[in-house]
Image (cartoon, coloured by chain):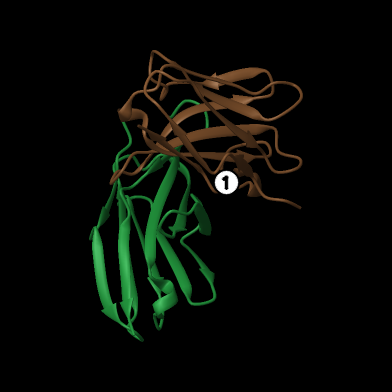
Chain colours: A brown, B green
Amino acid sequence: NAGVMQNPRHLVRRRGQEARLRCSPMKGHSHVYWYRQLPEEGLKFMVYLQKENIIDESGMPKERFSAEFPKEGPSILRIQQVVRGDSAAYFCASSPIPVGSGSSYNEQFFGPGTRLTVL
Amino acid sequence: KQEVTQIPAALSVPEGENLVLNCSFTDSAIYNLQWFRQDPGKGLTSLLLIQSSQREQTSGRLNASLDKSSGRSTLYIAASQPGDSATYLCAVKGIKAAGNKLTFGGGTRVLVKP
């Protein structure tokens, strides 16, 4: 069973370009989370999605950032008109069906990340 | 708002010593707490997951304890090896938080010297 896959692993963009980051969850997982790790900082939650639904986007910047998880295909994190401050590692995680305490399905499994560099 | 703190930020020990890593969180209403390992330039590897109803979890040389009422977790690594050098992150899933997001601490960077 393949783990969470992210591509590309490294992405270089010039200021003003668009960045598209892709995440394929583990087989059988229908919930996807995106986190961002800025240089020398901890991971911060960005968005939580189910198939065709955004459940929680409280961590997403108000402008230029969007995310989707279509019925078919990977989840996409899209950053328009990138700026140098967007340079970071972007991690995707997936889980089967998150439930309350006492369940083995609470765990999130992380992908290897996409490292975005904006020149 | 949940805040997670890890102290110390960095730790250096000689090979063979036991490692003790601390994690504290401000809101005790959590579903679970997870410890991760992150190697430089790499992703996160889940080490241990402790449910809110549990006091500790063990895996090999690793043991993690959870004291929910005081908002603390400790990760013990016995007989450290140079291969244990990495950044260790703790994260909590809060009951009050919308969705199922994890709130991470800043990490403890560990160096085990041969």
- Look at mark 1 in the image and give the residue it sits on: A111
**Residue A117, position as x, y percentages in the image:** 40, 36
Q: Residues within 10 Å of mark 1 (few under 14, many from 20)?
A: many
Q: Residue at x 42, y 47 (%)?
A: B91
Q: In this rendering, does residue B54 appear at all?
A: yes
The residue nearer to you, when weighing A51 against B40, is: B40
Answer above or below: position of A99 versus A48: below
Left or right relative to A45: residue B9: left
Q: Residue at x 39, y 13 (%)?
A: A63
The residue nearer to you, when weighing B109 against B41, is: B41
Residue B109 placement: quadrant: bottom left
Q: In this rendering, does residue B95 appear at all?
A: no
Q: Residue at x 32, y 54 (%)?
A: B107
Instruction: Please report, as a chain letter, where disc 1 is located.
Output: A
Residue A38 placement: quadrant: top left
Answer above or below: position of B23 versus B15: above
For numbered disc 1, what is the local secondary structure? loop
Amino acid found under the numbered disc labelled 1: Gly
The residue nearer to you, when weighing A6 against B103, is: A6
Q: Residue at x 30, y 59 (%)?
A: B108
Image quadrant containing the C terminus of chain A: top left
**Residue B100, position as x, y percentages in the image:** 52, 33
**Residue A64, position as x, y percentages in the image:** 42, 15
Q: Find the residue positioned furthest to the top.
A: A63
Answer above or below: position of A9 versus B88: above
Left or right relative to A6: residue B23: left
